[in-house]
Amino acid sequence: MEKSARRISAAPLLLLFLLCSLHSAFAGHDYGQALSKSILFFEAQRSGFLPHNQRVTWRSNSGLNDGKASGVDLVGGYYDAGDNVKFGLPMAFTVTMMSWSIIEYGKQMAASGELHNAMEAIKWGTDYFIKAHPEPNVLYGEVGDGNTDHYCWQRPEDMTTDRRAYRIDPSNPGSDLAGETAAAMAAASIVFRHSNPSYSRELLNHAYQLFDFADKYRGKYDSSITVAQKYYRSVSGYNDELLWAAAWLYQASNNQYYLNYLAANGDALGGTGWGMTEFGWDVKYAGVQTLVAKFLMQGRAGPHAAVFQRYQQKAEYFMCGCVGKGSRNIQKTPGGLIFRQRWNNLQFVTSASFLATVYSDYLSSARKSLQCSAGNVSPSELFSFAKSQVDYILGDNPRATSYMVGYGNNYPQQVHHRASSIVSFKKDPRPISCRGGYATWFSKKSSDPNLLTGAIVGGPDAYDNFADHRDNYEQTEPATYNNAPLLGILARLGGGHGGYNQLLPEVVVPAPRQPTRAPIARPVTPAPVSTSAPIALVQKVTASWKSEGKTYYRYSTIVTNKSPKALNSLKLYINKLYGPIWGLTKSGNSYGFPSWIKSLPAGKSLEFVYIHSASPADVSVSSYTLA
């Protein structure tokens, strides 16, 4: 990301060209191809030793001494945008959003054959975070310095800039950075839970420690890592990241502590108070509110329903603003694109579109609509809004320009990106000097020598204008956090809903077609509690009949103990139950083992049934203990 701003005007297109291009662009989109390209972009952003199966072949190894001067191995991770700095806060947000994309739409990614590549993209980030978190209360949050890096125009393979590592610790806290990294680790632990359970547990242990660090030693990270202030200043502070991390830890662990934390701190930390019109690497409130609304619709709020409803009201404030039916609506360009700022505006478009996509599916699963001040909005209308934003990015816009590099026939050719704008190290390994890169490559008016496939650039201005010039970094620079939310939306658009309930409690990410790499063994201080959920819940209809004009259904729910240990106690929350239930004992607001079962051995199952004339009840695990 670049510091300063420059005003650049764009000449209008010829009408004939516009009409011809529009006819071509509006013919429909290949969302599967766009998904494949979008994931491929992350391989171009890799730092460190590149793997044997690296598909972006014009890149080579880089940053191989990162962390060495500080006595820590920080080789790996991602360059955030068109520069060669590794900024921890946007990198962690990127991993969180890639993980959320898979959690919601992993089945569609698997059907498209891209799940393995998406999981590898996440693991490239989480492997780095494990290295960056060598002690419970230490986290390295940046490698390189934006000021010296931006003074040079060099390939990552040639870097001569300062590669100093910057960290947070109890004396130099950074709750926003630690909180976002905890969220990334927790979300990723869900992704790998079934395909790589030991790695999943390792990620979750790191997430526990990072959340405790963030919550106990509170402070803004850019007050500790001051070199980040010009590039990724934490304007929103750290309250949103504390809630964001707690929400992801609850989603990943089912540990009631984090649910209680969201309820107890919702007012004080702003989760129930802030009505937002943006969501991104700095401001997480709308994301927190969307997740908590999901917990509420799943029936997992328990005694905190009243507080969670206030979170949900703010989530719906955001959604209503997106579709233009709220009390405060998000600004749009004449062509219909969300517009917040000229500099890298598309980051806000992809993030908002992702929230609208998942929330539309939550509403559809719950058979609800969105209640806005200007009228009700159906789930399909909210989803249509998200689709319109993605279609705009892919070319359905007044300029008929695709803002994804390599997609369509008319996309940016002069991307503000050091690696893609300089001849590949493999073609010409002669070093590019710091200032020589500006003179030889940056100033060229020709297309980039390397195609940065899949990159989402900054995008057009408030009037749908765009100038494809390398020095126009506000519009032509890409970023990892532009692409990350797009993965889920493209998978959803390409694969359809698939007929599954987006609110079912057990998240199962299907195994990828290729095995993931074995985890690297590293010592990790164990968390005080390990609560990765070993309990599977499967519901199905076993009978139906009609009586007095109503159709009644008999639902069977199988609870399976997938742990190697005996399950000694179990509490289930059951919401939207409108008839009798057999096979459980009710205690207060929850249900437990029936009287004839004292514990559930490893690998064994129990069944309970209920009858009512509605859709399946929402069943979720509240708590449990293992022998």
Image: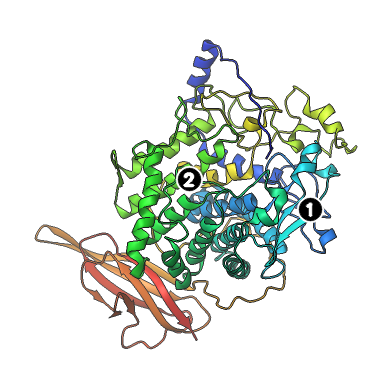
> Toward the viewer: 535 or 169?
169
At label 1, which amino acid type do we have?
A: Phe
Q: Residue at x 44, y 46 (%)?
A: 276
Query: Between disc 1 and disc 2, whose residue precedes?
Result: 1
Determine whether the residue tagged by mark 1 lies in a helix, strand or loop. loop
Split into 4 quadrants, where in the image is the N terminus? Answer: top right
Which residue lies under the disc numbered 1?
49
**Left or right: 367 in relation to 552:** right
Q: In this view, does 613 lie above or below 81?
A: below
Q: Could one spot residue 65 in this view of the protein?
A: yes
Rendering coords of residue 215 (x, y %): 56, 66
Q: Could one spot residue 361 in this view of the protein?
A: no
Q: Which mark is residue 467?
A: none
Question: Which residue of the protein is positioned furthest toward the left in this rendering?
Answer: 548
Q: Residue at x 49, y 49 (%)?
A: 108
Rendering coords of residue 573 (x, y %): 34, 71
Q: Residue at x 41, y 45 (%)?
A: 318
Which residue lies under the disc numbered 2?
354
Q: Is residue 554 above or below residue 85?
A: below
**Left or right: 248 in relation to 89:** left
Q: Residues within 10 Å of mark 1 (few under 14, many from 20)?
A: few
Rendering coords of residue 549 (x, y %): 11, 57
Alpha carbon distance from label 1 to label 2: 32 Å
